Amino acid sequence: MSANAATPNAKSMSIIVTKGTLDWAYPPFILATTAAAMDVKVSMFFTFYGLPLLLKKLDLQISPLGKPDMAMPMMGMHMKMPNMVAMLPGVNGMATKMMKNLIKKKGVASIEDLRTAAVDSEVELIGCQMTMDLFEFKKKDMIPGIVIGGAATYMEKALKSDINLFI
Amino acid sequence: MADKTVDARGDNCPIPILKAKKAIGEVPVGGTLEVLATDPGSVPDFRAFCQQTGNTLLEQTETGGVYRSLIKRVG
């Protein structure tokens, strides 16, 4: 059971999700699922590079390029990758594999699992129509149960929400 | 003895909370849910969870790196 229309005084939150890399997919889904568990009504608006997080088949990657703040634990130290190295072919794949291993080892949920939890707890998932047109995504390739809308659809939610986040 | 126990040992944020939310719905009103977790962050998180959902946090203890939260279902 989650917060829904049956509890009119429930708190509400909206999140604009603009990034679809493996690392940046975490904050919105963690906050959305946790808020839903705390009886908060949640709407997530997926736009630009966040939109592919609604695709049925997820293939999330990270890139260490241009990320001087990305410190991966390695052999008891923290490794930061210079851009000269990060730009080489195969580095993104390697970094993604390392991150996925860490996620598994540290008992962190997968994005797939968090997304399923979001759907199960009735988080409203809104796909941006303009982004779908712009990047040629089809609704049939997206998970069922999502809503498609534009900025006004988001604004309607945001104006009524107690918390609005842009991630 | 709690009505139900959730084993969230080895799970990281926010899985202990998500598991507890699911499980507390299966506990009768007035009943208790015990959550076992190894994530130290779950200690303040269960305090916040109970505060927000109106359930009562009866006790929190730690034994050998396992954090146990005992929650009474109110609503």
Image (cartoon, grey):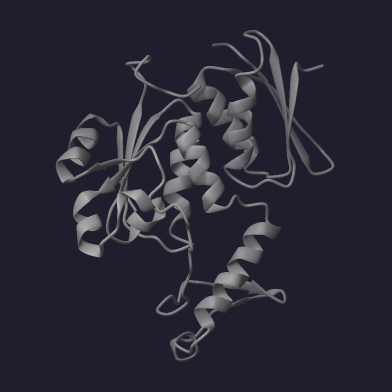
Q: Residue at the spot x=46%, y=74% of the render? A: A63
- The answer to whether residue A61 is above or below residue A159 is below
- The answer to whether residue B57 is above or below residue A90 is above
Judge from the rendering whether residue B25 lies leftward or rightward of residue B69; answer left or right: left
- Residue at the extreme front: A140
Q: Nearer the viewer, residue B40 or A107?
A: A107
Quadrant housing residue A165: top left
- Residue at the extreme right: B64
Q: Residue at the spot x=60%, y=49% of the render? A: A109
Q: Residue at the spot x=56%, y=46% of the render? A: A113
- Residue at the extreme top: B30
Judge from the rendering whether residue B27 lies leftward or rightward of residue A4; answer left or right: right
Q: Nearer the viewer, residue B38 or B19?
A: B19
- The answer to whether residue A111 is above or below residue A59 is above
Residue A135's x, y, as percent? 25, 64
Residue A48's x, y, as percent? 27, 59
